[in-house]
Amino acid sequence: MTALRIVFMGTPDFAVPSLRALADAGHAIVAVYTQPPRPAGRGQKEQTSPVHRFAAERGIPVRTPKSLRNAGVQAEFADLGADIGVVAAYGLILPQPVLDAPRLGCLNVHGSLLPRWRGAAPIQRAILAGDAETGITIMQMDAGLDTGAMLLEDRVAITADTTASTLHDALAAMGARLIVEAVAGVADGRLTPVPQPEEGVTYAAKLTREDGRLDWSNDAAFVERQVRALTPWPGCWFDLPAALGGERIKVLEAAPADGDGPPGTLLDDRLTVACGTGAVRLLRVQRPGKAPVDGAAFLRGFAIPTGTVLGPGSCSAGN
């Protein structure tokens, strides 16, 4: 295998396995581009990204421009003389001069089976939608939003036990394997880009905290998927009625359950809540400033009468 000069562009944990795999495969990572340090945690201290930290440990030069649209930044990128660029959850748009600078162009590690779930949150949206499977697509980048021609893909089933965390880890590992194969295949001419189908395009809109609001009028299957898809971020929650203090309760784990009633009605002492169709049992919940507890323990420490309506809420994710 010919060692290539690679510029890697990524930010979160999802991108680290791909960067590690390329470095371990013997390629020269001439620079890493990642999002600038951001305030985080209670102290709001600036923290570098997971990709930044990994690159620093490996002694790889790191660059953190706020934008790639500046001509000087683009010139610095071109001066690296990269054979290929690899992008994995970077978070910045690559202008055409950046896309064109590497000799073999730029490849993207995308966490869905394109053209389904183009955009920012493909892992969570696939679970929310009840998709039976998802996967990784390695794509030759163009100026569009995840519209480039496809080079490789692999698939993984989404089961009733799949969470955003487990799917994230599975796809990150899959992406690391595929990007090494794709880089080698592009370099020696074995891979031919295939245009994406025109049908089946969906967009994975960026998540907001409001996406985590539980709307009990949705069917139970959707509410249960919502908890699996949006934990740990943005997290799922509901507000207690004002008569009970109006606290915001996080829901960390839920399961389908038997029962019915007006949406939001507490059905028993195990924290089973009626939905638009069916019911869900809230298995792990958390009060503000408290440790997570199981649903029954929550009710033992915070008495809520059976029959209480926990509030309708509204959910921007929809059915």
Image (tube, rainbow, N blue to C red):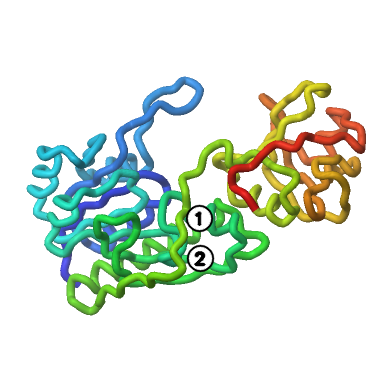
Q: Please provide percent x and percent y for residue 301.
A: 84, 29
- Does residue 208 appear left or right of residue 37 in this picture? right
**Amino acid carrying mark 1 in the image:** Ile
Instruction: Look at 36% across and 67% down and name the residue there.
Output: 178
Q: Classify 10 Å Cα crowding around label 2: few (below 14), some (14-19), many (20 and above).
A: many
- The foreground one among 260 and 79 is 260
C-beta proximity under 8 Å, tags 1 and 2? yes
- Does residue 78 appear left or right of residue 310 in this picture? left
- Does residue 168 appear left or right of residue 69 in this picture? right
Q: Secondary structure at mark 1?
A: helix
Residue 6 occupies quadrant = bottom left
Q: Is residue 19 visible?
A: no
Q: Classify 10 Å Cα crowding around label 1: few (below 14), some (14-19), many (20 and above).
A: many
Q: Is residue 38 visible?
A: yes
**Amino acid carrying mark 2 in the image:** Thr
What is the number of the mark on residue 123? 1
What is the number of the mark on residue 223? none
Q: Which residue is mark 2?
A: 134
First of labels 1, 2 by sequence position: 1
In the rendered view, tell whether residue 1 sits above or below residue 4. below
- The foreground one among 220 and 285 is 220
Instruction: Look at 17% across and 50% down and name the residue there.
Output: 98
In the rendered view, tell whether residue 262 sits above or below residue 137. above
In the rendered view, tell whether residue 94 sits above or below residue 290. below
